[in-house]
Amino acid sequence: MQSVGLTYTTSVDKKPTLKARVKSFGRSGKFSRTVNALDDVSIDVHYGTVLGIIGSNGAGKSSLMRVISGIVPPSQGRIEVYGSVSTLLALGVGFNASLTGRENVYLGGLAAGMTRAEIDNQFDEIAEFSELGEAIDSPMRTYSSGMYARLAFSVAATVKPDILIIDEALSTGDARFKQKSLNRIKELRTEDRALILVSHALATIEDICNEVIWLDKGKMMARGNPAEVITSYREYMHVRKSASSDEDV
Amino acid sequence: MSTPVTVYEPFRAGLPPMRQYLRSLWSRRHFIAEFSRSELREQNYGSVFGQLWLVLNPLLLSGVYFLLIYIIGGASDANRYVHLTSSLFFFYLIANSLTGGVKSITAGQRLIMNTAFPRIMLPISASVIAIFKFIPTLIVFFAVRTIVGAPYSWQMLWALPIFLLGVFMGLGMAISISCTNVYFRDIASLLPYITRSLIYLSPILYEASALSEKMRTLEIANPIFNLLDAWSQVMVYAQAPSSSSILISLAWATFIFFVGTYFFLSRERDFAVRL
């Protein structure tokens, strides 16, 4: 990524009433504001790297992930991506709650870019990992949020691309499933793959990643050794090492 | 390095690399089918008859027009009844593409914001759903036209290219309107009035031959007028359609498809920041 910036305009509608709309008709430009989501960010990520991205809410972490994966075009700069990219930016993308878990494994897998044959081959593994048992054949409307997230993570973790981008997907299910998810992510760390991980769980980032970037208001504040960057971030945020800052709660 | 390289640069209106785009679209064909099927199932989820509604809908619609023409109207005009049902069912193929397509991008926000894929898949899915809904109506229609004793001939094979032309037209309209709705959301509220106007301006409640020569000339401006006329000729009278009907329909369908697709493809990278 070379000098990447992302700017977008959002509408500001303080009074979404009919009267306000009539008064502002034809002057919509007045009610918008520009957001600088990313400002001159340059990074290189090589195969074998597990890059953690940290920062407060609104720092630009998700925007950075969307720019790298080609979902949103940058406003300035240039990004070169070598190899296939798979994103896990939100769990259950493409799922349809009216369908059964089994049908959603196919729908979610196909949405993630897998082929039907690949899903056929890995279906048993996905079902077993999700620990849903017979519920896999029930409509997902009947699932608890934890069950929903478990199946979604199981599908997403089956995709094995060259570059895997994961945004806040480790806060899934109960403590045991969280540990299982973390182990799956660790299994995905190989020399021929790059992992980019966004999380507020600083201990997890320190445990998994070999490099960390700290973003604040769209700017890159620091990059380097996980322990050092996380310490700087904690000092800046006036947050001490604690359960609430180390893990998703 | 032998791995494929993708470059992302600031958005400029213009076509993406087409070979790569089409390859990506083709590789997602199973997702389009599965996504369309799931959307269709959701529409009838929780109802007692479920997917049976795909057949019940045209059957009931046909029953309503039987009531209107035979019982209330007191006429035994089989041609009028067959024309009305065949034209209306074919009209819904196009109208369902439009109504499904209009919000296909804005409703697919979660997918668009979290996955990179050819966005044109979403209006294509809307057209696939329209085809899924149309096929059962054909079964009902052929049952109806057999019962009322409408003629059959080899000329009815014209129905296949006209159907494909209808799909092509509906797809072009779905792509165009889905993109328009990203920039001008009011189009979704205007759509019911557009489709209602199209019903009255097209040869559905009346036959094209009932119009004056002057009106027929003006109807060239209606993209679906000649298409529906051709469909009626084939399905009601089992006759070959006029070549002018086919050519005018083909010209309209091609125009709408290519202009709409160009507009869509040249803007689709901008969708994520517009949703």
Image: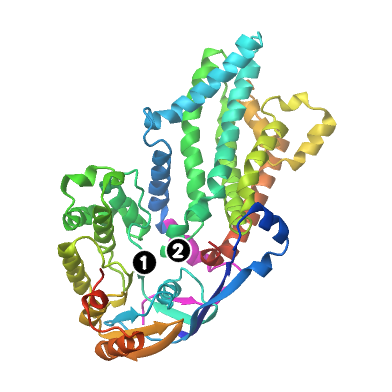
Task: Write the residue at 16% across / 48% down.
Answer: A133
> Which disc, if any, is residue A27?
none
Label 1 close to label 2 by CB (< 8 Å): yes
The spot of residue B244 in percent (x, y) is 73, 37
Residue closer to the observer: A136 or B81: A136
Residue closer to the observer: A22 or B8: A22
Task: Write the residue at 64% across / 17% down.
Answer: B79
In the figure, A65 relative to B167: above or below? below
Res. A73 in view: yes
- Asked if residue B5 lies in the magenta stretch, the reply is yes
The spot of residue B110 in percent (x, y) is 43, 58
Q: Is residue B208 left or right of residue A130?
A: right
Q: CA distance from mark 1 to mark 2?
A: 9 Å
- Stretch of the chain drawn in magenta: B1-26
- Residue type at mark 1 is Leu
Disc 2 target residue: B113
* Both marks 1 and 2 on one chain: no
Badge 2, how many Cα within 10 Å: few under 14, some, many 20+? some
> Which disc, if any, is residue A89?
1
Host chain of mark 1:
A
Host chain of mark 2:
B
Res. B115 in view: no
Quadrant hosting residue A222: bottom left
- Asked if residue B230 lies in the magenta stretch, the reply is no
The N terminus of chain A - image quarter: bottom left
Quadrant hosting residue A121: bottom left
In the figure, B74 relative to A14: above or below? above
In the figure, A29 relative to B219: above or below? below
Badge 1, how many Cα within 10 Å: few under 14, some, many 20+? many
The C terminus of chain A - image quarter: bottom left
The spot of residue B226 in percent (x, y) is 70, 36
Residue closer to the observer: A209 or A15: A15
